[in-house]
Image: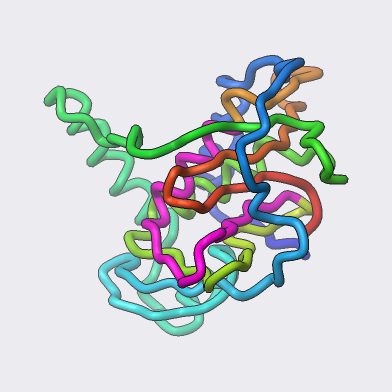
Amino acid sequence: MKFAFNTSLLALAGLAFTAVASAIPTTVTVPSGSGYKNYPLGVMTFSGTIGGHAVQLNGTIQEINTQMVANFPDFNMDALVAANLAKREAEAEAATPANLFTRSKSGMLCWPVPSQDWSLCSVSVIGQGITYLDNFNGLCGVGANSCVRISCSYSSAIYLCNDNDYGITPTCPYMGSYAQDIINDCSHCEGPNDCVTCGQEFDSDNYNIIVRDNC
């Protein structure tokens, strides 16, 4: 499935992710449990505030953005990205960390991931998905022992998989930080704007984020 990115700020945010890409590691350690094979694919739930609107919606972050545009004529993704960017810059100048995403990440696998047939996908498109996640203030939900696509565009996807016997609702920006980690550690660039990535990062709370091809 393809989603057109109509906002210039969002496109620029996606391109910015190519600058931090590094070489794909040649060795990896496989954490216990893949958290993906044979799991059913569900639909992500979102509960939170977007652009000042309290909402409960379902779908990928791009589908939720489309629903926001349809339901709230005043919603403007460009304005939301710009406002949050200004806020983060102010926090940085005040030496106040904007992100404290160091909690319980427990291991990473880079492409080729053992026992999986995943392929590489676009770093810039994944970066645009991360921008959505960073700017949607809420919870990304997944059911027990299942996976959901939290971002999907141009054959580049971010999945959230839950190994627990109960549903979970981690924060969407925190899920975006996993995808950013995968970009940072599992990417390969043929040129400044031609970077690809694929990988899986685990959390000690028994869930994981996958970045791969195939929407």
Image quadrant where residue 60 sits: bottom right
Queried whether the magenta region covers residue 176, the answer comes back as yes
Front-most of 10 and 30? 30
Residue 66: give x, y in percent of width and height: 55, 73
Queried whether the magenta region covers residue 204, the answer comes back as no
Q: Which residue is drawn at 80% across and 55% down?
A: 214
Residue 155: give x, y in percent of width and height: 79, 53
Residue 10: give x, y in percent of width and height: 52, 47
Q: Residue at x 69, y 23 (%)?
A: 28
Image quadrant where residue 190 sits: top right
Q: Is residue 210 above or below residue 64?
A: above
Residue stretch rendered in magenta on the structure: 156-182
Q: In this view, does 214 lie above or below 32?
A: below
In the orientation shown, which residue stands out farthest toward the front? 32
Instruction: Give left or right: position of 7 versus 36.
Output: left
Q: Quadrant of the C terminus?
A: bottom right
Front-most of 134 and 42? 42
In the orientation shown, which residue stands out farthest toward the bottom? 71
Front-most of 42 and 1? 42
In the orientation shown, which residue stands out farthest toward the right? 117
Q: Residue at x 77, y 41 (%)?
A: 121
Counting every numbered tag in the picture gives 0
Q: In which quarter of the image is the N terminus?
A: bottom right
Instruction: Give left or right: position of 195 versus 5.
Output: right
Q: Which residue is drawn at 58% across and 41% down?
A: 127
The colour scheme is rainbow
Residue 101: give x, y in percent of width and height: 34, 36
